[in-house]
Structures are given as structure tokens and as C-alpha cells.
Image: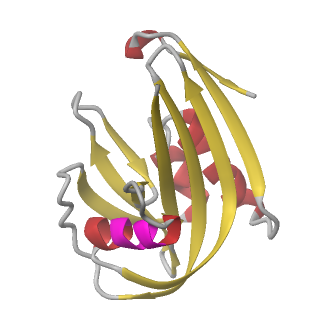
Amino acid sequence: MREWLVAGGLILGPEGLLLVKNVRRNGRADWTPPGGVIDEGEDLVTGLTREVKEETGLTVESWLGPVYRLETMAPGLGWHMRFEAHLAVEVSGELAIDDPDGIVVDAAWVDVDVCGERLATTHPWVREPLVEWLAERWDDERSFGYHVDGANPADLVVRRV
């Protein structure tokens, strides 16, 4: 079973929440907060800061959080993912896309009232906690869990647990 530790950055600006457009290996596109897989031996916040810089050109000097955590199990696909979302407190730089992984192809500040629409094609374990946080803006840390049944990406059933 492949184990992933992933972090996402919640970066709010005057125009909304920063989302990045990802084009996956299978050609599918979706929008998510910037972030990604944390390298082995790398501290989560250090890895998140690196991922945000690579994907957006922005430098985050400080983070608050985690705001929420989630765990997703996908035994039929052979993976288990742990995820943390952190809120950016101090941000500098200019938005510039230069993802060395070639996954992020665009970025946009999205009005928080329409983020749910932009996230419509995103996996539930990405979309649901983020939309709930945007609606409530809780101060305490929350946890979410998901189980993915199936081995064929076209026929997966996702359950919130």
C-alpha cells in the first residue's frame, strides 16, 4: 500500500481563495488549493511552503493550523493518504505558475461564495472539507475521513466515514 502525506495551503486574498488548476496524468483537470505531496524526511510545513512556492510563485512566511486534517483510504487503488490544510498568515511575492512537476497549469483567486462551483470536479475528500471550512471558518482543528471503494477510477464509490 502506497502511503502519502499531503498538505494544502489555504491562501485568502482580497479577491477570494487561491486555487490552482491541475492536469492529471490521465488528462483530467481539477481545481484545488496549492500544495502537494510532502517529500520523505521533510517537515510538513516546510514541504507545504515549498509546494506553494513551486506552484504559485508565492512565499508564505507563516502558517496557522492545521485548520483541518483528513485521512483517505483507497485499498482497491493501493493507497492511503493523510492530509493537512493550513491557513497562510503572511504571504509575499507575485503569482507565477512554474510547477516543476508539470501538473499545475493555472491559478486563480476565486470568490469564496463560488468556490464550490470551481471545485465541482474535484474529489470529495478535497472539496467537502474545504467548502465546509469556507462556510464556517472554524477556529478549532477538524478531522475528516473517507473510504474509496473500487479499483477502476471510472467506477469508484467514495464514502465519508
Q: Tell me: residue 70, above or below residue 107.
A: above
Which of the pair 13/124 is nearer the observer? Answer: 124
Q: Residue at x 32, y 88 (%)?
A: 93
Q: Tell me: residue 2, above or below residue 110.
A: above
Q: Residue at x 28, y 32 (%)?
A: 28
Q: Is residue 109 left or right of residue 93?
A: right
Residue 47 lies in magenta, yes or no?
yes
Q: What is the basis of the colouring in this image?
A: secondary structure
Q: Residue at x 48, y 67 (%)?
A: 43
Helix, strand or loop: magenta stretch: helix
Q: Which residues are magenta?
A: 46-51
Residue 70, image x and y in percent? 65, 45
Residue 158, image x and y in percent? 60, 22
Q: Is residue 44 left or right of residue 19?
A: right
**Residue at the extreme front of the image, as rendered:** 41
Residue 51, image x and y in percent? 35, 65
Count of labels in the image: 0
* Rendered image quadrant of residue 159: top right
Q: Residue at x 27, y 68 (%)?
A: 54
Which of the pair 105/79 is nearer the observer? Answer: 79
Q: Tell me: residue 73, above or below residue 155.
A: below
**Do we see residue 10 in this rendering?**
no
Residue 2 lies in magenta, yes or no?
no
Residue 25, image x and y in percent? 22, 33
Q: Is residue 48 left or right of residue 27?
A: right
Q: Tell me: residue 108, above or below residue 118.
A: below
Quarter of the figure with the C terminus: top right
**Do we see residue 51 in this rendering?**
yes
